[in-house]
Amino acid sequence: MIAVVTGMVGIDKKQYLEEVVRLANERGKQVTLCNVGDMMYAEAPDIAAGRILDIPLQRLRSLRRSIIKDIIAKARNGENIIINTHATFRWRHGLFRAFDFDQMRQLDADYYICMVDSVDALHVRLLAEHPINHTLKDLLVWREEETIATELMKEGVNEDAGYYILARGEDKTTIESCYRMIFEPERKKAYLSFPMTHVMDMPEVLEEIADFRGKMKESFTCFDPGDLEEAYLPYRAKRAAQSGQDFIELHALGRKVRLDLAEAINVEKDISSQTYTRDFALIDQSNMIISYIPHLGEGRAAISSGVERELQHAHEAGKEVYVIWPSPKDPSVFVTQTATKVFRSLDEAAGFFTD
């Protein structure tokens, strides 16, 4: 088994994938983690830490090819290998690729996984670990480039290989999801659908949604849009603007961070368009969609236009469609006609999926 895991600088894939390998080892699987960046530094000790992207592109490419050649040799021995690498770089040289098709075809990986993370988390890590200047817009562009380049890498090597987008998130349940994707491919994959933006100020509803997310992750390999939630940034920015501030303060990765107000407002369209595209891609890579529609009282159900679009997309894509509808008021025909099954409580759904 060979898995290529990509993701832009600032995701901290190394630590994350070490956790995945540790989990695999605990479950009796021997896995080798190949951190391409670390291997390149070991091969070229004259390069100072954190400066490898500053060397001439020709030397960078030659160094990378030497390392990938060694990994290909390991793969021929039949080892389980996870390769921590990148599809692209956006650095002082501009945008450039981080792989060669001839070598990737020799490697012939079983899975290509592009890890993504929220723009605030990326911003915090890059401020702490890398000297290069960036804007929030830069991070969103780079994240999208890395995702597309990883998909092209897979398409150019083997159309039948698995390709997944996986949100890193702050919750360790995504480590379990990554493990299941690679080592339990037979386990069903579920996209979790629920309202987000318009319930963000409703703590009781958010608690219900958290319970739903946790219970579904017990049974399935889950793709959870809540693991990459950034729509609140422009929302918070607009509220800050109304109060006369020129910045917003938020917490990311356990740290308080201050963002420029104009920057946060400026990326609203980018966040919206990427969320729309990414969530549909997550549905496409799943076997089913499970949607939780909270009850808001007085018979009202918190079904948003985004959730309705997700349900329709899943139905048209031939996915299993499950809806959890606690409201005493019956769902509309647009829900019942597209749903494989409608549950009236979370417990009913959990019981159905664990039977």
Image (cartoon, helix red, strand yellow):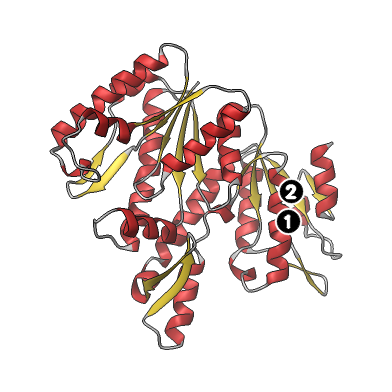
Looking at the picture, how far across and down is residue 45, in whole percent? 20, 33
Looking at the picture, how far across and down is residue 72, in whole percent? 35, 18
Identify the secondary structure beneath mark 1: helix
Question: Residue 334's mark?
Answer: none
At x 38% / y 71%, what residue is drawn?
A: 259
Q: Is residue 141 left or right of residue 62?
A: right
Q: Estimate the spatial distance between the alpha carbons at disc 2 and disc 1, rounded to whole Å.
A: 6 Å
Which residue is under mark 1? Answer: 211
- Mark 1 surroundings: few (<14), some (14-19) or many (≥20) residues within 10 A: few
Q: Is residue 256 left or right of residue 59?
A: right
Looking at the picture, how far across and down is residue 191, in whole percent? 63, 45
At x 84% / y 61%, what residue is drawn?
A: 330
**Quarter the C terminus occupies:** top right
Disc 1 residue type (three-letter):
Asp
* Residue farthest along the top direction in this orientation: 77
Q: Is residue 97 left or right of residue 83?
A: left
Q: Nearer the viewer, residue 37 or 199?
A: 37
Disc 2 residue type (three-letter):
Lys
At x 33% / y 50%, what residue is drawn?
A: 142
Q: Is 169 placed above or below 39 here?
A: below
Which residue is under mark 2? Answer: 215
**In this view of the protein, can residue 124 be seen by the observer?**
yes
Q: Nearer the viewer, residue 341 or 271?
A: 271
